[in-house]
Image: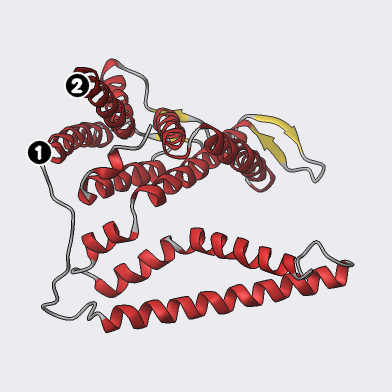
Amino acid sequence: MEDAFSTYHPVINFFYFAVVLLFSMFFNHPAFLGISLIGAVIYSLVLLGIRRSLKFNLVGMLPMLLLVALINPLFNHGGVTIIGYWPTGNPITMESIVYGVVMAVMFIEVIVWFACYNTIMTSDKFIYLFGRVIPALSLILSMVLRFVPKFKTQLKIITQGQQCIGRDIHSGNFFRRARNGIHILSIMITWALENAIDTADSMKARGYGLKGRTSFSIFTFDTRDKIVGAVMLVLFISVCGGIIGGLAYASYNPIIRFSAFTPLSISVYTAYLAFCLMPVCVDIIEELQWRSLKSSI
């Protein structure tokens, strides 16, 4: 199923990711953590496909989750519930373990959300939103966000080319492999610098950032954008109201405390869940409408 949410106006896309990323980074209540992680994983399944998403989340993110969760008790010994001692004599507390898991989940969900963001918010969308307000910064941020996937693609091309002439990192003894790796890295750095200069010269030649310069755009804010935007705004205001009311409070040192689950708080968490799953709901509705139209032909 193709993603329908990516076809919406850039304002809608950016507002959605700005909210979920900010909430994921600044609120560590268990309900917010669980909902954000569930929403990020489900949306990554829709965008990347089941195979790529499982490979990304399980092979890449799960070991990182365990690593971050284990690092915190090694250095953080705060908490009142002691469950053991390290060989150095420092205590192992339940609060430090729980907080390590919380920090690991926050770290992972932010990475997954950014992976979804990079798929939806293309360079043309970002420049459309901020090109007139902050032209230089928007161009730099656009180049930075698309640098990693371009770098990986170019690295694959260069590695295959070096492999054809027997100069890849798998050829020869240890020292030759190291030299080949350094050579590939040098080629990549040179390519990255040249690509940045070419991009800057190209945008300058087009008059990018000049006062009074107009630009073509294919984005229009239509009726469906207004409907989805209104629903997202209502959900956002509901969640913000709950946050202001203290329903997102959580503390893990020296004891674990967080706002209790009440009917009011559950309604706020439900609104946040609906907000996180908004793109998936949009995709499902669009798919059902498309199937209905095809069946009526």
The quadrant of the image that shows the C terminus is: top left
SS category of the residue bearing label 2: loop
Residue at which label 1 appears: 223
88 relative position to 79: left or right: right
Q: Residues within 10 Å of mark 1 (few under 14, many from 20)?
A: few
Q: Is residue 196 above or below residue 235?
A: below
Residue at (40, 67) in percent of width and height = 143
Of residues 96 and 123, the one drawn nearer to the viewer in this rendering: 123
Residue at (29, 60) in percent of width and height = 124
Residue 253 can be seen in this image:
no
Query: Cα distance, mark 1 to mark 2?
Result: 25 Å
Residue at (17, 32) in percent of width and height = 231
Residue 219 can be seen in this image:
yes
Q: Residue 131 at what x, y percent from top left?
A: 23, 68
Q: Amino acid at mark 2?
A: Ile
Q: Earlier in the sequence, mark 1 or mark 2?
A: 1
Residue at which label 2 appears: 297
192 relative position to 136: left or right: right
Q: Is residue 252 above or below residue 208?
A: above
Q: Tell me how the rendering is colored.
A: secondary structure
Of residues 2 and 244, the one drawn nearer to the viewer in this rendering: 2
Q: Amino acid at mark 1?
A: Thr
Q: Residue furthest right?
A: 173
